[in-house]
Image (tube, grey):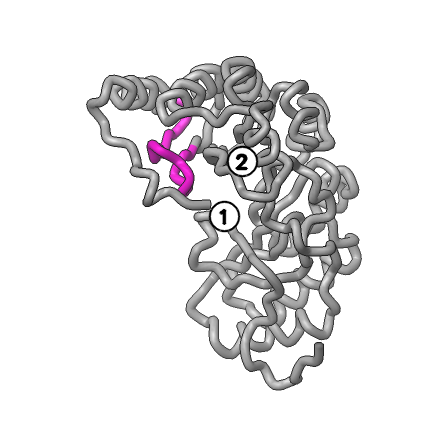
């Protein structure tokens, strides 16, 4: 595949995703796929072999953004865990963003336990100083058995360890729903992050999770059960500050909970929803 030096659009490869809060951000695909790509529930990068894009292509995308995206003040670096990019190359990219897009106020990216562990405290401080303002860190669960089942390549202790060095939740199935919810709430309390994003699992055809469901080894929760799990998680989560969000398109009940004062009100809203007094998002409106 060849690319022109004249900026004519962003060079995206394959299916791409970004967090809801990055809807209006400049999306730069710095990596292709996910360096782990083994989680049983995820089919996003199934057909992508992980690689870091050539600097030449990234520079072309920045040139396009420089010309056409002057009203967007945030950048989100894709794909699955751009933090895995070696430090020298990642700091170069942040420097290029600052030089070519000086109006940008924040750069964000996805990360996992492994990618965080490749960075020293000094590395993370350097990235922050160069404009990295938010890291979306997927923990999925605080239950070690669930983490092993979904091939997360992490334990709750390792997630806390690396998450504390930074500062997003949920997938257990019916069998360990309560344990998963409470353990995840405990993990979040230990992390005490600025933002928590709770998503609801959607089964993607062709993934190991879908195969387990088809074979009867795993059962997808019903909407009411999802609400009970969410309630358990929020009840077990004690944060000193920040926001707990369930406003992703996958969620049945959108919530924005300021901690610590909004917790009890949120639990009351969930109770009202469980009693049928608050409508849930219909299936046709839910999405990944």
Q: Which residues are magenta?
A: 245-260
Q: Position of residue 215 (x, y in %)?
A: 59, 28
x and y percent of residue 262 in the render?
Answer: 34, 24
Assess whether residue 252 is covered by the magenta stretch.
yes
Q: Position of residue 46 (x, y in %)?
A: 65, 49
**Vertical relation: 248 (above or below) 258:** below
Q: Residue at x 56, y 72 (%)?
A: 10
Q: Earlier in the sequence, mark 2 or mark 1?
A: 1
| Residue 128 % position (x, y) | 64, 49
Residue wearing tag 1: 19
Q: Is residue 117 magenta?
A: no
Residue 1 or residue 211, whichever sits in front: 211
Q: Is residue 261 visible?
A: no
**Magenta region, main secondary structure:** loop
| Other-residue count near label 2 (Cα within 10 Å), few / some / many at <14 / 14–19 / ≥20 | many
**Identity of the residue furthest to the front in this view:** 215
Report the Cα–Cα distance between label 2 and label 1. Answer: 10 Å
Secondary structure beneath label 1: loop
Q: Which numbered disc covers residue 168?
A: 2
- Point out which mark residue 198 bears: none
Q: Is residue 108 visible?
A: yes
Residue 279 vs residue 174, the one in the foreground: 174
Instruction: Please name the residue shown 38% across and 39% down the image.
Output: 247
| In the depicted structure, whether residue 261 falls above or below residue 19 | above
Name the residue: 66% across, 68% down: 96
Residue 113 left/right relative to 28: right
> Can you say which quadrant of the picture contains the N terminus?
bottom right
Q: Are marks 2 and 1 in contact (CB under 8 Å)?
A: yes
């Amino acid at each position: 595949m060849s690319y022109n030096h004249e900026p004519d659009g962003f060079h995206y490869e394959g299916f791409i995703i970004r967090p809801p809060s990055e809807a209006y951000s400049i999306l730069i695909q710095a990596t292709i796929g996910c360096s782990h790509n083994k989680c049983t529930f995820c089919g996003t990068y199934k057909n992508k072999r992980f690689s870091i894009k050539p600097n030449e292509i990234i520079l072309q995308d920045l040139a396009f953004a420089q010309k056409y995206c002057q009203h967007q003040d945030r950048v989100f670096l894709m794909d699955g865990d751009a933090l895995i990019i070696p430090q020298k190359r990642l700091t170069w990219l942040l420097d290029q963003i600052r030089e070519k897009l000086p109006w940008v106020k924040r750069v964000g990216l996805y990360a996992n336990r492994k990618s965080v562990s490749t960075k020293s405290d000094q590395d993370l401080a350097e990235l922050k100083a160069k404009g990295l303002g938010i890291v979306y860190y997927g923990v999925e669960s605080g239950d070690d058995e669930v983490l092993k089942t979904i091939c997360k390549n992490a334990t709750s202790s390792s997630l806390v360890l690396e998450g504390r060095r930074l500062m997003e939740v949920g997938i257990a199935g019916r069998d360990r729903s309560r344990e998963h919810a409470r353990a995840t709430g405990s993990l979040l309390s230990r992390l005490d992050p600025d933002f928590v994003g709770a998503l609801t699992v959607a089964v993607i055809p062709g993934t190991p999770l879908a195969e387990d469901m088809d074979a009867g080894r795993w059962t997808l929760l019903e909407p009411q059960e999802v609400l009970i799990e969410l309630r358990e998680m929020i009840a077990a989560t004690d944060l000193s500050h920040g926001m707990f969000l369930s406003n992703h398109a996958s969620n049945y009940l959108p919530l924005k909970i300021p901690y610590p004062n909004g917790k009890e009100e949120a639990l009351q809203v969930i109770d009202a929803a469980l009693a049928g007094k608050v409508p849930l998002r219909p299936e046709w409106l839910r999405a990944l």
